[in-house]
Structure formats: structure tokens, C-alpha cells
Image: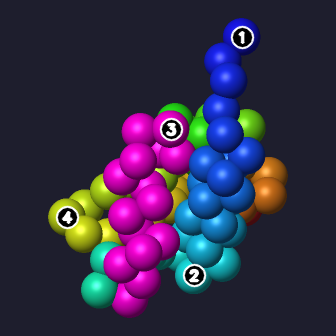
Amino acid sequence: MVFVHSESVRKAFKVFLTIIEKSELKKSDDTILFNYYEDPEVSYLVHLMEEEAGIMIIRAGDTLYYSPCVDNRFFGYSNEEIRK
């Protein structure tokens, strides 16, 4: 069993929601929130949220983006929808 601090869960959720809401998180726009992601415990929790949501969070320099995984019904298109 892995023990995580409740504050880390809150930070991870804030990071995750911001990326989903704005499609990106830039360090220049929100240094504090971006730095949360650099905490190993927070980034681990965000990674778990990624897996459950069926998305990938991609870091490019000082910006985090999200991309839906294939056939993600909530954040993207299924292969069938793309073919149509």
C-alpha cells in the first residue's frame, strides 16, 4: 500500500483539472501550479489520473499538454467517429 499525503492529492487534482480545462499548463502562466507537478509524489498521482482518464500528459519544455488516448470517449474521438 502506498501512502500519499492529502495535500499532494489536492495539488495533483488541481494540476490535472487545469490541464484538462485549459488544454495546457505553462510555467510562465502559473509557476506555483507547474512546480506542483515537479514534486515526485504529485506527478505520480497525476500519472494515475492520466491512466484512469485515458489521456496522456505531455511535457514540452515548460508547458504541459494533454492528448486523449485512442478511443477515449470523453476527451477525444473514437476511430469510428474519425472515419465518419
Q: Residue at x 41, y 39 (%)?
A: 40
Q: Say which mark, if any, is on residue 1.
A: 1
User: Pointer 1: residues within 10 angstroms few (<14), some, or many (20+)?
Assistant: few
Name the outermost residue toward the bottom. Answer: 29
From the viewer's perspective, is the residue at label 4 or at label 1 nearer?
Answer: 1
Q: Residue at x 66, y 18 (%)?
A: 2
C-alpha distance separating marks 3 and 1 = 14 Å
Residue at the far left in the pictured view? 61
Mark closer to the chain start, 3 or 1 = 1
Classify residue 50 by image quadrant.
top right
Q: Which residue is located at x 52 percent, y 46 percent?
A: 42
Q: At which x and y percent is residue 57?
A: 47, 52
| Mark number, residue 36 | none
- The residue labelled by disc 2 is 22
Residue 61's disc number: 4
Point out the stretch of residues depicted in magenta.
29-43
Label 1, secondary structure: give it: loop
Q: Given the image, on which type of amino acid does mark 4 rest?
A: Gly
Determine whether 64 is above or below 25 in the image.
Answer: above
